[in-house]
Amino acid sequence: MKFRVEIGVLAGTFASQQLAFAHLLDANPGADLEQVEVLARPFGPRLRGYFPDDTVAQLEQLTEPTLILLLPGSGVAPRDTRMLRFVGRYSGTLTRALLPDTE
């Protein structure tokens, strides 16, 4: 099922996905990292799963090599940190499977 959501985008430079997640936890203790996507270049293939083509084209123009998508419920503040720049919030879609109640 597809849900229309607002997705926060941060941009920065990290040597690995693990270092990006570590920085997010330092800046946002208690963040739910299952609701965070860390993307390295090329961004397009992964961004297309969330955003329309015009938004993808806009985000691909950013100069930073790492993008972080803040999905609803991430608990990560959409703001600049010492290593990240808040780019903005963008309308996108989130695809989730609805699981039947097994009880």
Image (spheres, rainbow, N blue to C red):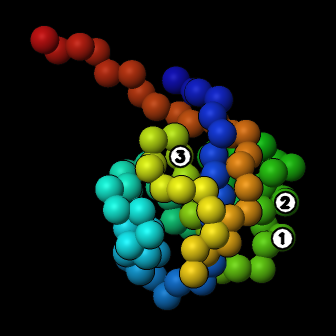
Q: Dot 1 surroundings within 10 Å: few (below 14), some, or many (20 or more)?
A: few
Q: Position of residue 39 (x, y in %)?
A: 56, 67
Q: Position of residue 57 (x, y in %)?
A: 84, 59
Depicted 11 relative to depicted 58: above or below? below
Q: Dot 2 surroundings within 10 Å: few (below 14), some, or many (20 or more)?
A: few
Q: Dot 3 surroundings within 10 Å: few (below 14), some, or many (20 or more)?
A: many
Q: Position of residue 60 (x, y in %)?
A: 78, 67
Q: Which mark is residue 71?
A: 3
Q: Residue at x 43, y 75 (%)?
A: 23
Q: Residue at x 36, y 51 (%)?
A: 32
Disc 1: which residue: 61
Q: Is residue 66 visible?
A: no
Q: Residue at x 56, y 36 (%)?
A: 94
The kind of residue on which mark 2 rests is Gln
Give the structural element (helix, strand or loop) at label 3.
loop
Choose between 17 and 88: the one closer to the eye.
88
Q: Which mark is residue 7?
A: none
Disc 2: which residue: 58
Q: Quadrant of the C terminus?
A: top left
Residue 26's image quarter?
A: bottom left
Q: Is residue 54 visible?
A: yes
Separation of disc 3 and disc 1 at Cα?
21 Å
Residue 66's image quarter?
A: bottom right
Depicted 59 relative to depicted 66: above or below? above
Choose between 89 and 48: the one closer to the eye.
89
In the picture, measured across the screen, residue 50 lies left or right of residue 87, that is: left
Q: Nearer the viewer, mark 3 or mark 1?
A: 3
In the picture, measured across the screen, residue 94 lies left or right of residue 28, that is: right
